[in-house]
Image (cartoon, rainbow, N blue to C red):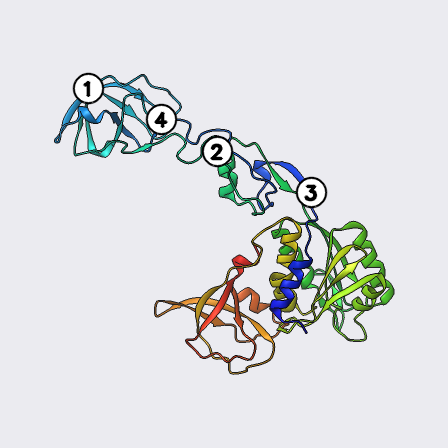
């Protein structure tokens, strides 16, 4: 069996860019992977402007104490004022261009207006409350990092730079199916021995969060003939195939035999818990990832191994989740040879972030993933005592 670290290194070494570049409206790029470096078409802001409501003045017109000045003009956002006359003040509002000659904006809370005059109180400095032209972006500045998945703030910055479209990678086409004669869909009446297919919905949610185009092939019967046919159909339609179930070594598990006939099995089994039977291979030239069938194993192995592979295949960089160190709020006395990924929730105890683990860590207990807000990593051949430092990965790093 491969170690968990060797597994992710291998998968990332195998991942290749499978998407093309397309221009997409900036309003529609959320979650897409940026393909090229865009540059700003404008200075942001385009002119020196006021950071707040108040009065634009010249510092040399102010005394150390209160100063009374006539109000010579009123400038709202979107308006261009006249050059400021010496010895006067301009009433100005947030975002309005600062008039030529003014070098200070005094917030209105420090002023008292009386008719057509204003009393300026306190001491002030040049540049106070003025946002300078181009202080955020200058025309021609590169913005955003290729390989990053675009967030709402990235969309906003692109829009502020005048970019109506962004160059992003096309959506990765991913075919999914589950194996197992026992599986039925929610809404159907369950006969004795049948169970509802939760993995199908977990995978659709996880892949939808990545912005992938999902090709849902449903459930494949437990026969070699059906498995061969479904894999061939998936390879003809998709860039990558992801399955759940059928990757163990039982007599009713046909994925390995089908892969041997249609392509290759390049990796099989990882020294981890949950999720030892994790497979990688190819159907012809189409990459294949086979996840174990137990619901928690499907979820964990997708998040930790399939997700980084898919992100890199769609042009992403920095694809591995970030880990933080937290205090263990539990004991783990079993030092097994496989790395464990236990479902946990962070609580603040005595001022420190502390991981509390779900009481039942079985690979079929999907409730543990609903209760938890992340995963704690228990290293191989290591015992953990309450208060020890452990590594934690938030679900926000794994399912966004």
Instruction: Measure how far apart labels 1 and 4 are at the Cα level.
Output: 20 Å
Marking on residue 87:
1
Which quarter of the figure has residue 126? Answer: top left
Q: Position of residue 91 (x, y in %)?
A: 27, 24
Instruction: Measure how far apart labels 1 and 3 are at the Cα level.
Output: 61 Å
Q: Are marks 2 and 4 in contact (CB under 8 Å)?
A: no
Q: Position of residue 225 (x, y in %)?
A: 87, 64
Instruction: Measure how far apart labels 4 and 3 are at the Cα level.
Output: 42 Å
Instruction: Measure how far apart labels 2 and 1 are at the Cα level.
Output: 35 Å
- Is residue 135 depicted above or below 345 in this figure? above
The tag earlier along the polypeptide, 2 or 1, is: 1
Residues packed near mark 3 inside 10 Å, few (<14), some (14 to 19) or many (20 plus): some
Q: Position of residue 111 (x, y in %)?
A: 20, 30
- Look at discs 1 and 3 and give the one toward the viewer: 3
The tag earlier along the polypeptide, 3 or 2, is: 3
Quadrant containing the C terminus in the rendered view = bottom right
Q: How many marks?
A: 4
Question: Is 170 in front, or is 345?
Answer: 170
- Is residue 360 depicted above or below 36 in this figure? below
* Residue found 51% across the figure and 60% down from its top: 322
* Residue found 68% across the figure and 63% down from its top: 199
Marking on residue 96:
4
Marking on residue 160:
2
Marking on residue 20:
3
Q: What secondary structure is marked by label 3? A: loop
């Amino acid at each position: 069996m491969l170690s968990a670290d060797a597994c992710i290194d291998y998968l990332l070494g195998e991942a290749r860019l499978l998407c093309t570049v397309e221009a997409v409206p900036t309003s529609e790029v959320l979650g897409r992977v940026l393909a090229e470096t865009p540059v700003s078409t404008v200075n942001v802001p385009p002119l020196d402007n006021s950071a707040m409501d108040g009065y634009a003045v010249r510092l040399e017109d102010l005394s150390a104490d209160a100063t009374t000045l006539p109000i010579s003009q009123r400038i709202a956002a979107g308006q261009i004022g006249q050059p400021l006359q010496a010895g006067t003040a301009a009433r100005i509002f947030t975002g309005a261009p600062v008039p030529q000659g003014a070098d200070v904006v005094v917030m209105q809370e420090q002023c008292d207006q009386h008719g057509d005059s204003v009393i300026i109180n306190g001491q002030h400095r040049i540049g106070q409350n003025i946002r300078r032209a181009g202080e955020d972006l200058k025309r021609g500045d590169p913005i955003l990092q290729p390989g990053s998945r675009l967030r709402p703030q990235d969309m906003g910055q692109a829009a502020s730079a005048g970019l109506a479209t962004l160059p992003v990678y096309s959506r990765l086409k991913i075919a999914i199916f589950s194996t197992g004669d026992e599986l039925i869909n929610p809404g159907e009446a369950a006969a004795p021995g049948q169970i509802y297919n939760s993995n199908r919905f977990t995978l659709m949610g996880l892949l939808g969060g990545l912005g992938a185009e999902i090709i849902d092939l449903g459930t494949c019967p437990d026969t070699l003939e059906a498995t061969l046919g479904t894999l061939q159909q998936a390879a003809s339609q998709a860039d990558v195939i992801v399955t759940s179930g059928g990757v163990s070594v039982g007599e009713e598990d046909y994925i390995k035999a089908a892969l041997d006939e249609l392509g290759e099995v390049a990796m099989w089994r990882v020294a981890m818990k949950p999720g030892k039977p994790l497979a990688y291979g190819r159907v012809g030239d189409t990459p294949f990832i086979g996840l174990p069938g137990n619901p928690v194993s499907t979820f964990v192995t997708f998040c930790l191994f399939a997700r980084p592979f898919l992100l890199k295949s769609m042009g992403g960089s920095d694809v591995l989740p970030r880990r933080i160190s937290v205090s263990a709020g539990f004991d783990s006395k079993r030092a097994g040879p496989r790395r464990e990924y236990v479902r946990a929730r962070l609580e603040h105890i005595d001022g420190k972030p502390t991981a509390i683990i779900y009481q039942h860590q079985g690979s079929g207990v999907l409730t543990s993933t609903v209760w938890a807000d992340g995963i704690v990593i228990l290293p191989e051949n290591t015992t953990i005592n309450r208060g020890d430092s452990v590594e934690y990965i938030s679900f926000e790093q794994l399912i966004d």
